[in-house]
Amino acid sequence: MNITLHKSKIVNEKSEVTITGSKSESNRLLLLQALYPNIKLQNVSNSDDSNLMTNALNSNSEVVDIHHAGTAMRFLTAYFSIQEGREVVLTGSKRMKERPIQILVEALQELGAEISYEENEGYPPIKIKGKKLTKNKVSLKANVSSQYISALLLIAPKLENGLELTLEGEITSVPYIKMTLSLLDEIGVESSFVGNTITVKPKNNHKQPTTLTVESDWSSASYYFSIAALSELGTEITLSSYKKDSLQGDSTLVDVYKHFGVESIFSNNKVTLIKKTANFRPLSLDLKNAPDIAQTIAVTCFALGIACDLKGLHTLKIKETDRLVALKTEIEKLGGHVKITDKSLHLTASTHIKESVSIGTYNDHRMAMAFAPLALKTPIIIEDAEVVSKSYPTFWDDLKSIGFKISE
Ligand SMILES: O=C(O)C1=C[C@@H](OP(=O)(O)O)[C@@H](O)[C@H](O)C1
Ligand SMILES: C=C(OP(=O)(O)O)C(=O)O
């Protein structure tokens, strides 16, 4: 379904939004809950990806289809590898079959897992015969996706001797690895991360039961930072439930958006974004620790006529779509000028935004959500708007509630 976002303005008195739980935290905790059923969870994400994770963990079926959910694909590969006696084919969408998984599969095979490819070598679908894994040391490349590392860490406390991982090369998306270790710590699993070595001890079952509350999703919050940045001075938007010391690396938004004159104030599990000053200086950022906010930031810069150089984007090519190509294509439709390499994006300061352009979303929730704030500047059409449900199903309703005018 394509939707039209008419030129909109934020209604200050109503601008309070409650965002669903982090999909990254939820998908880790759902897996840990399947391994340790005494864990209780609150504010679990209502995203498609977390629902797919829950269904996969509860299913007895021989084929498990996780559609577009990257974390579910990677985390479940590790999970099913240790389900003794179970045989599962893990598959996904057409795009999922193009997202590489070999680094994780080889690491698990090294630990003793039995995994084979059903179609193309190195890619889903894969067949997993669950076994007891007895080895506890493995090395793997760390510069392609941190999800491979998190997947191994999540099953590590169930291995009889725990796990020692040696990470090769530059480590990408480090905050997501630290999030995994912090959540393990919260359920009583000891670990250390020193240099390029991560060690996880097997879990002794003393600490139980545990109730964990998932913080709301910071990647989803990014669209409101962009909205605040594009709004009139004095505009305020309050988001819940958020805390200053987040496990989510995307909370770096608080610092990044200061550049655009957005101030963030934390109080009572909420964060209020206030548009304070206008600033048009160019922006230069390395996003290797926060790849999911690259699209949001690029569109904010385009909308405000700010030039930007974004680096550390090497993982964007293997996400829901090739996000570098998608950003270039769609920003150029709107009249912008973008240069990309395999790991960077350069945007020239724009002077105008074309009206009523139809933005392609390429099965990528973040393409739809990142371009939506442009409606504060000009009318825009978002194609296949339902894609947002991958991480944030109520996105369009929440935008309407703060003043966006949207029609089908
Ligand atoms: O572990 C996670 O929850 C995630 C890790 C990141 O992936 P990469 O490590 O592949 O960059 C991120 O882009 C993804 O949305 C979620
Ligand atoms: C990359 C993402 O998700 P995944 O890798 O889990 O599909 C995302 O949500 O931006």
Image (cartoon, helix red, strand yellow):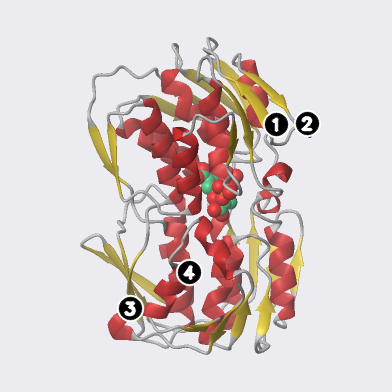
User: Which numbered disc, 1 or 2, marks the residue closer to the eye?
Assistant: 2
Q: Residue at x 39, y 30 (%)?
A: 34
> Does ligand 2 reach within 8 Å of label 4's beta carbon?
no
Q: Amino acid at mark 3?
A: Ser
Whole-Å distance between the Cαs marked 3 and 2? 49 Å
Whole-Å distance between the Cαs marked 4 and 3? 13 Å
Q: Would you identify the image quadrant in which residue 126 lies?
A: top right
> Does ligand 2 reach within 8 Å of label 3's beta carbon?
no
The tag earlier along the polypeptide, 4 or 1, is: 1
Whole-Å distance between the Cαs marked 4 and 1? 33 Å
* Residue identifier under label 4: 223
Secondary structure type for disc 4 = helix
The tag earlier along the polypeptide, 3 or 1, is: 3
Q: Which mark is residue 102?
A: 1
Q: Amino acid at mark 1?
A: Gln
Secondary structure type for disc 1 = helix
Q: Give x and y (percent) for residue 230.
A: 49, 81
Q: Which mark is residue 71?
A: none
Q: Nearer the viewer, residue 5 or 213?
A: 5
Whether residue 123 is situated above or below residue 357 in the rendered picture: above
* Residue identifier under label 2: 121
> Does ligand 1 reach within 8 Å of label 1's beta carbon?
no
Query: Given contact means CB atoms under 8 Å apart, are the residues at marks 1 and 2 in contact?
Result: yes
The tag earlier along the polypeptide, 4 or 3, is: 3
> Does ligand 1 reach within 8 Å of label 2's beta carbon?
no
Q: Which mark is residue 15?
A: 3
Q: Nearer the viewer, residue 102 or 297?
A: 102
Whole-Å distance between the Cαs marked 1 and 2? 8 Å
